Image (cartoon, rainbow, N blue to C red):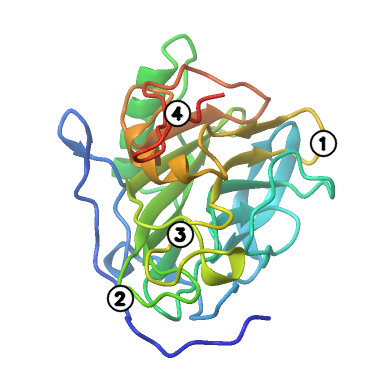
Amino acid sequence: MKSSFAVLLLMAGAVRSVVPAQDDEPLLYPYGLDQHDHKNPKLDDGASKKLSLSVPFTFYGKEHRSLYVNNNGVISFSSRVNQYTPDPFPLADGRTFVAPYWGDVDNVLGGEVFYRETTEPALLQRITKSINQYFPTIPYTATWAFVATWDHVAYYGSTSNKGNTFQAALTTDTKMSFIILNYADIQWTSGLASGGDPDTGLGGTPAHAGFNSGDESNFYNIPGSRTEAIINITKTSNVNVPGRWVFQVDKFKVTGVPTEEPKIPDSKSCWL
């Protein structure tokens, strides 16, 4: 376990959904204490308790009735993930999780990790509208959602006030399942223990984004993962909305083509 640093920044539970997505709607779904969110403990490499779900969520052919929201940018279905330096998918140990932005978050130094399970009609209507737009041949009406938001979270060893804000929304109609990943503000890619620079949050082994089903065939690495280019994930998409990636996950299916090649700042392209 890495040693704790002094608290530099404690973020309040305010709603931060200000980045446009489409039709003047915010990129992020509402979150924060006034949305009745829960907060993860202030703990480096920490996680939520095991969270029981009111409905099963199907992830690559397997129903899950519980999950963990991990501070290090991961939602896992089988066990907590305290690993802070990301590995590429597929993982040799068969862990099952989605990684919105797997990196060395330290919410003791700054930021909050929020989450809630919800059937709030306005949110479900908004999610339904998005899924219908991105998957026009699939009839879908959301009946449940789980929203996790990492709000201006700091990186381990930080000597700056940089923070990352990103979100994952899981949704189902009890038959089909989708995950929406929203990236509002990405300012760092790696923590000190992953080889990153404490002043910039860059270098070392950068963060990773994608999905791992637990087998060796069903996985997806969002372009730019574990390279410097992941910092530009706010500008890329597979649904033509910068900063948003959407996947149908009840069965393995990668939809859409990235709208922008993720470029390394002041360097060559990393597109594979």
Label 1 element class: loop
Please name which of the two marks, 3 or 1, marks the residue nearer to the observer: 1
Q: Look at the numbered discs 3 and 4 and tell me whether their residues touch, using CB distance below 8 Å.
A: no
- Give the distance between the C-alpha atoms of the residues marked 4 and 2, in whole angstroms: 35 Å
Above or below: residue 228 compared with residue 237: below
Q: Residue 221, percent across and down?
A: 60, 34
Left or right relative to 228: residue 57:
right
Question: Who comes first in sequence, dot 3 or dot 4?
Answer: 3
Please name which of the two marks, 4 or 1, marks the residue nearer to the observer: 4
Above or below: residue 263 compared with residue 43: above
User: Quick one: label 3, few (<14), some, or many (20+) residues within 10 Å?
Assistant: some
Q: Residue 202, percent across and down?
A: 44, 58
Residue topped by disc 1: 215
Label 4 element class: loop
- Where residue 82 sits, quadrant-wise, is bottom right
- Residue at 45% over, 59% down: 116
Q: Say what amino acid the circle numbered 4 marks.
A: Ser
Label 3 element class: strand
- Give the distance between the C-alpha atoms of the residues marked 4 and 1, in whole angstroms: 30 Å
Residue topped by disc 4: 269
Question: Who comes first in sequence, dot 3 or dot 1?
Answer: 3
Residue topped by disc 3: 116
Q: Say what amino acid the circle numbered 3 marks.
A: Arg
Left or right relative to 256: residue 76:
right
Question: Who comes first in sequence, dot 2 or dot 1?
Answer: 2
Q: Quadrant of the C terminus?
A: top right
Furthest residue in direction top, as rendered? 137
Q: Say what amino acid the circle numbered 1 marks.
A: Asp
